[in-house]
């Protein structure tokens, strides 16, 4: 059973802290910016990889701090991704974040993660997030490739047309829901017919 509750965060409205500037720190900041290019991120680490420095050089919303993590780095942060190579310190940072009610992801240590990153299929406005409940990130990555190929390319046009219909529809909420369900029923009916 996967009990994780999926949500889609507007990281441009939040302030994310990343602790650690090595390979994993780079992977995490890349995942954040690929999805949310306007995310506000502070990254703290005594040694920061060159790739991270070049990302920050062209993005004023990324702030790099070149020193070890200090508890007050958590001030005014909404979520934290911990990726240092010091396991006990990772755990201590998670505990400190917990005490301040800030949710944390700790690379390498699912037991003390409040949230996981997901594998992400993107097609224009459509985004599908995949989790295997931490069982196999590699399977999540493969499924992303499979779904990416399986989803039709004209979904964006369909979404745009449905949005236009949605904006045009008059009447109360229930009648709008009925109409949108009627228009889109073909999507599931075709599948039923094929069986
Ligand atoms: C629990 C979770 C917590 C979290 O990190 O958020 C976690 C944990 C761990 N990952 C490990 C290893 C690898 N992770 C990847 C890849 C990804 N890992 C991601 C998410 C998650 N990884 C969360 C669960 C997601 C879920 O529910 O399915 C993805 C989806 C998203 C992202 O990270 O951005 C991204 C794919 C992105 C994409 O391309 O689509 C690869 C493959 C590769 O890179 O090719 C490997 C190597 C192969 C292997 O080990 O499987 C290890 C062992 C470390 C060690 O052995 O030292 C742990 C720790 C453990 O399991 O104990
Ligand atoms: N490299 C990989 O592909 C994987 C690594 N891991 C694990 O993830 C962790 C991080 O790995 P890497 O990024 O590869 O390590 P790395 O050695 O490349 O980077 C570690 C980073 O942590 C920083 N750091 C150390 N102590 C700190 C502190 N007190 N405060 C702030 N920053 C601090 C360092 O300055 C450096 O930027 C390690 O525990 C590693 O075992 C897990 C899975 C895969």
Image: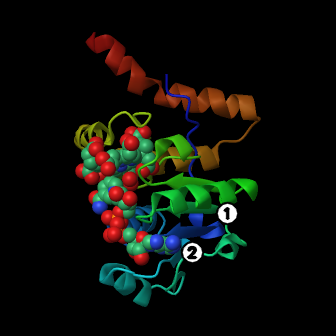
Most foreground residue, 16 or 24: 24
Please say if 169 is above or below 67.
above
| Residue at 32% over, 36% down | 136
Residue 113 appears at what percent x and percent y? 54, 47
Mark 2, ligand 2, within 8 Å: the answer is yes
User: Dot 2 lies on which element?
Assistant: loop
Most foreground residue, 96 or 102: 96
| Residue that numbered label 2 is attached to | 69
Please say if 171 is above or below 38.
above
Please say if 37 is above or below 61.
above
Q: Check the image and tell me how it is coloured.
A: rainbow
Residue 30 appears at what percent x and percent y? 38, 67
> Is residue 116 visible to the viewer in this orientation of the structure?
yes
Q: Is the residue under label 1 in contact with that under label 2 (CB below 8 Å)?
A: no
Q: From mark 2 to mark 1, how far is it between C-alphas?
A: 16 Å
Q: Identify the image quadrant of residue 27.
A: bottom left
Marks 2, 1: nearer the viewer: 2
Q: Residue furthest front?
A: 88
| Residue at 39% over, 81% down | 48
Most foreground residue, 167 or 57: 57
């Amino acid at each position: 059973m996967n009990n994780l509750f999926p949500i889609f965060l507007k990281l441009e409205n939040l302030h994310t802290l990343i602790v650690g500037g090595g390979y994993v720190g780079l992977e995490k900041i890349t995942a954040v910016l690929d999805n949310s290019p306007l995310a506000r991120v502070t990254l703290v680490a005594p040694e920061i990889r060159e790739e991270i420095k070049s990302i920050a050089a062209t993005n004023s919303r990324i702030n790099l701090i070149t020193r070890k993590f200090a508890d007050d780095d958590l001030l005014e942060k909404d979520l934290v991704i911990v990726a240092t190579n010091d396991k006990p310190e990772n755990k201590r940072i998670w505990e400190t974040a917990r005490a301040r009610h800030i949710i944390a992801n700790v690379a390498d240590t699912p037991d003390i993660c409040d949230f996981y990153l997901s594998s992400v299929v993107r097609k224009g406005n459509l985004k599908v997030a995949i989790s295997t409940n931490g069982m196999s990130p590699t399977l999540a990555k493969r499924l992303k490739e499979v779904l990416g190929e399986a989803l039709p390319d004209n979904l964006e046009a369909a979404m745009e047309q449905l949005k236009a219909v949605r904006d045009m529809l008059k009447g109360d909420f229930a009648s709008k829901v009925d109409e949108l369900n009627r228009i889109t029923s073909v999507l599931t009916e075709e599948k039923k017919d094929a069986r």
